Image: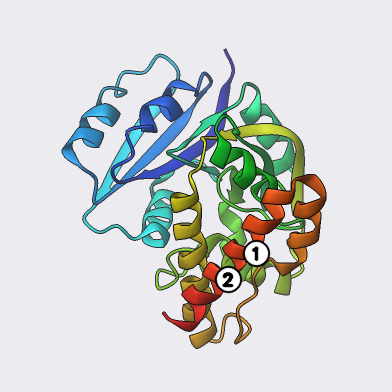
Amino acid sequence: MKKYKISVVVCVADDKRIKNMLDSIKEKCEVVVVLNGATEEVKKIVEAYKHSAYFALNMVEIPERNLSKSRNVGMKSAHYDNVIFYDSDCVMTEGALKKYEEMFEKYMLVDGAVKFRSDTFQSKIISVQRSMGLPGYALCPSMGVRKDIVEKIGYYFDEDIKWIEDSELNNRAKKENIEVGTIESLTCIHDNLTFKQDLKSAYRYGTGVKIAASKGLHKKRPTANWNLIMPCFKKKFLAGIYCIIWNIVYCFGYYFK
């Protein structure tokens, strides 16, 4: 089995699905799990992988639940220069590391294709918008970052911006004309989402944009995904209705932060 000089970083607090994520990694690599204010139950789940037959576990703990800070800690704790961010509610697909290895030879930022599961009524509607992504951006989950990018963009993740930290990094990269490499084939499967979970994220994204705007790192207005409304309607009527609601909640996060 080939050993990849790649570090997979997963940040987790209370999501027991971290077990599914770790079980999905069937390649020789380093896995950095950042426990950010994690529960004892989650700690025990992760500790059980100390002697994994596949990957070398590097477990790091911080007291607070700050996603941006935990991603920075993961970057700094990773032994390899090529880092991929996955989330605890995802699983890695077979052959993903090989795809990333090839892309890292040319690109500092790599976006891996993500499939959003749609096994429930709610997730079938949510997955329509979620699967559209943001072309030209490398976003979590399944976001590849080469450590040497910091020489051009100054720092990895802004720890004041907790929920759009990945897109803010991309914005700085774009200003430096850093090209994003895109893996067209599947690298990650995201678990089913509920309306509550997804709309909570929408509110947080709006809040993150407001914080970034206050620091001069973002346009001083909510940049919701209004452009996705019609494409969503074309795919599924209810998805179009939901997209409108999602964008409104996003704006609430911005204006009422």
Question: Who is closer to the viewer here, 240 or 98?
Answer: 240
The residue under the point 21% across, 55% down is 63
Residue situated furthest left in the rendering: 40
Instruction: Report the amino acid beneath label 1.
Output: Ile
- Quick one: label 2, few (<14), some, or many (20+) residues within 10 Å? some
Query: What x and y, as percent, mark residue 116?
Result: 61, 38
* Residue at image mark 2: 248
Can residue 212 be seen from the camera position used here?
Answer: yes
Image quarter hosting the C terminus: bottom left
Image quarter hosting the N terminus: top right
Query: What x and y, as percent, mark residue 239?
Result: 68, 50
In the image, is 70 to the left or to the right of 173?
left
Cα distance between the residues tagged 1 and 2: 6 Å
Instruction: Report the amino acid beneath label 2.
Output: Ile
Query: What x and y, as percent, mark residue 227?
Result: 77, 66
Q: How is the image coloured?
A: rainbow
Q: Quadrant of residue 251?
A: bottom right
Can residue 107 be seen from the camera position used here?
Answer: no
The residue under the point 37% across, 61% down is 69
Question: Who is closer to the viewer here, 116 or 92?
Answer: 116
The residue under the point 50% across, 41% down is 80
Q: Evaluate if marks 1 and 2 touch, with contact meaning CB atoms under 8 Å apart.
A: yes
Element type at mark 1: helix
**Which mark is on residue 244?**
1
Q: Is residue 145 above or below residue 186?
A: below
Q: Is residue 158 above or below residue 133?
A: below
The residue under the point 52% across, 36% down is 192
- Quick one: label 1, few (<14), some, or many (20+) residues within 10 Å? some
Q: Is residue 229 above or below residue 192?
A: below
Query: What x and y, as percent, mark residue 167?
Result: 60, 64
